[in-house]
Image (spheres, rainbow, N blue to C red):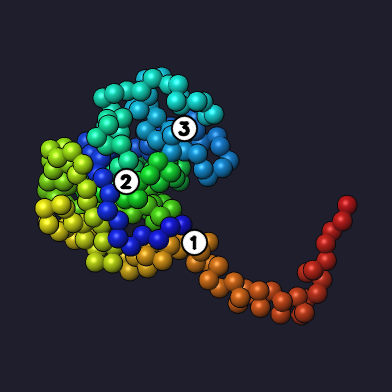
Amino acid sequence: MDKFTVHSGLAAPLDRENVDTDAIIPKQFLKSIKRTGFGPNLFDEWRYKDVGQPGQDNSKRPLNPDFVLNQPRYQGASILLARNNFGCGSSREHAPWALTQYGFRAVIAPSFADIFFNNCYKNGLLPVALTDLQVDHLFNETMAFPGYQLTIDLDRQVVVTPGGDSYSFDIAPFRKYCMLNGFDDIGLTLRQKDKIKSYEAERLTKMPWLGNRVVG
């Protein structure tokens, strides 16, 4: 996954509490066996006026002009502002896939559902928990000033506003290490690939029958 060090980007305000994973990526899109292509269907039931289906040409679907991500001022947003309990509901990992494939690098909210919160770190999406008052301030600023951008410095663990306000956030040291270096679970394992190859070669000399293949 991509490293997360310092990211500056346009913020988009999703002013809803208890946004569940079925709203983030509806269940009909979970039929895909691939891990790509979910971005166009992020918040599908809110972005479009019809019911979306896998493989559909989204460019021909009627958009809901009232939904925040369809508004011109928020096009290209890479930081999502949300409310309490973001990512509740089922444990589908497709939710952070859809958010990252849409273009989001971080979600800022007062609280997150636990499974979604953990899945974010495994997929390069940074969940930032700030206080209700701090999130309220960011919502007000974002809606008041078109083009409002935030900077998230993971190493310093701060969110910085255009006006110079700085809000600190907590993150577990191991998760921070993985995000800074772009390590998902597979990436962490591959750091030991030389040791793994050495172990497998040694084991094969001691138990050569493990190298036999069953034919037919």
Residue 92 falls left or right of residue 126: right
Q: Position of residue 137 (x, y in %)?
A: 12, 46
Of residue 83 and residue 181, the one placed in the foreground of this image is 181
Q: Which mark is residue 78?
A: 2
Residue at the right extreme of this rendering:
216
Considering only vertical position in the picture, is 68 above or below 190? above
Residue 106 falls left or right of residue 216: left
Q: Residue at x 56, y 42 (%)?
A: 34
Which residue corresponds to mark 3?
Answer: 27
Give the Cα separation between the discs numbered 1 and 3: 25 Å
Which residue corresponds to mark 1?
Answer: 185
Per the image, label 2 sits on a secondary structure element best described as loop
Per the image, label 3 sits on a secondary structure element best described as helix
Of residue 213 and residue 32, the one placed in the foreground of this image is 32
Question: Which mark is in front, 1 or 2?
Answer: 2
Residue type, label 2: Ser
The image quadrant of residue 212 is bottom right
Considering only vertical position in the picture, is 25 above or below 7? above
The image quadrant of residue 50 is top left
Q: Residue at x 11, y 53 (%)?
A: 163
Q: Earlier in the sequence, mark 2 or mark 3?
A: 3
Q: Earlier in the sequence, mark 1 or mark 2?
A: 2
Residue 141 falls left or right of residue 106: left
Q: Position of residue 196 (x, y in %)?
A: 62, 73
Considering only vertical position in the picture, is 15 above or below 158? above
Residue type, label 1: Asp
